[in-house]
Amino acid sequence: MSASLAFVLVVALAYLAAHLAVDRLARRFLIVSGAEYLLLGILLGPRVSGILSADVVRSFAPLTTLALGWIGAVVGLQLDLRELVRTRGVMFRLAFLESLLTFLVVSGVEAAAVAWLYGLPVENALLPGAALGGIAVASSSRAVDVVAERQLGVERPALLQFKVSVLVNSVFAVLAFGLLASVWHPSVPVRGRAITATEWMVITIAIGAVGGVLFHLFVRDERNVDRLFVALGGGIILVSGAATYAGLSPILAALVFGALLVNTSANRAELAAALARVERPLYLVLLVFAGAAWRPSARPWLWVIPVLLFLAARVFAKVGASRLVARANGMLPILGPDWGRGLVGQGGLALAIALNYVYQDGGTLPYFVFTAAIASVLLTDLLSARLIESVVNGLVRRIEVD
């Protein structure tokens, strides 16, 4: 199959699914779809049917980079300071501490498992361990949105906490991976010395900031959504492409780009509408090509233990950390002891970070990290919205009984 035909078929499938079936099923049956597109990509990919050959998958690397940048920009656009300051500080504190504890627990478990199973030095095992720690922090934003639509007009403290936690989880995961890409960046000597990790991080942020400044210079306060969509596409291509070329995180650069726009533009609603126009279809395209890019190990049995450990450690860390920080901050009566179950759903950002890790230069065990992320998405996405609603409804019933 030619690359052009493959592209047309995948994009057409994603648009039809996003507009005709996926959102409708999600709202009616609380099913956050996506896992089937991963499986479809695996089946179409070079490792199974070969319909999408390895050359075709590689030829769509620019499209994948755009999708990664688009996801980062969507996260950044949620960082409107005027809205965030209206939220209680304790909610951000809970979300940050839960993110930090989840990252530390999963990173430690995975680094130890990888070092033991693969016989790697600890410093080499830290890279895939920390990557999986960042991936573990991310939670499904789509699942929260689906439940919020069903609970429309009803004030639920737990649901608001889920929204805050998912946003903080997303920012923490993107920042963690951006820092990881800077720390483990291949050495680049400039004027007799190598660029430091701090300088790489500053470069990543600067790429996003420069993209935001250029966007304002050329677009200013444009209100037409169609023109904004084209301009945003160009801006994200520029930012994510520059970050990828430099061996940095396009997701973090695009997050900075989106955050700058939402806090300096008067047309925030139009920007959000333009980004949302193709967010879901582009995500489904990313899922298909992510599945096609997956590659099994020559020794698959080595993957089983650390992947299972990742799944178990992530669930344990999410639920345990959420309960611990809620108790420490006096929020346990409001959120309940098991509110962390609502953060178990993995979501698309985790897959985007894992795919970014695969394309990152110098990454250790990239397809092991990718496999763990795929397994987590496949196993948690279908149940994520139901878990959130069960937590919210359980709290409502307990309040009514009391």
Image (spheres, rainbow, N blue to C red):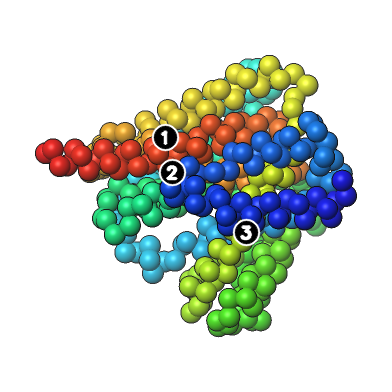
The residue carrying mark 1 is: 318
Q: Residue 223 location in percent, x, y?
A: 55, 81
Q: Report the residue at 71% width, 63% height from top.
A: 237
In percent of the image, x 63 and y 81: which residue is there? 219
Disc 2 marks which amino acid? Leu
The residue under label 3 is which amino acid type?
A: Trp
- Picture coordinates of residue 11, whole percent (x, y): 71, 55
Give the crowd class for mark 3: few <14, some 14-19, many >=20 residues within 10 Å. Answer: many
How far apart are the two marked residues, 3 and 1, measured between alpha carbons?
Answer: 27 Å
62 sits to left or right of 13: right
Position of the C terminus by quadrant: top left
Marks 1 and 3: in contact by CB < 8 Å?
no
**Image check: 29 left or right of 43?**
left
Residue 70, numbered label? 3
Q: Is residue 51 left or right of residue 16?
A: right
Q: Name the residue type under label 1.
A: Lys
Q: Earlier in the sequence, mark 2 or mark 1?
A: 2
Q: Nearer the viewer, residue 77 or 282?
A: 282
- Alpha carbon distance from label 2 to label 3: 25 Å
Residue drawn at x 81%, y 42% as measured from the top left? 52
- Give the CA separation, mark 2 to mark 1: 21 Å
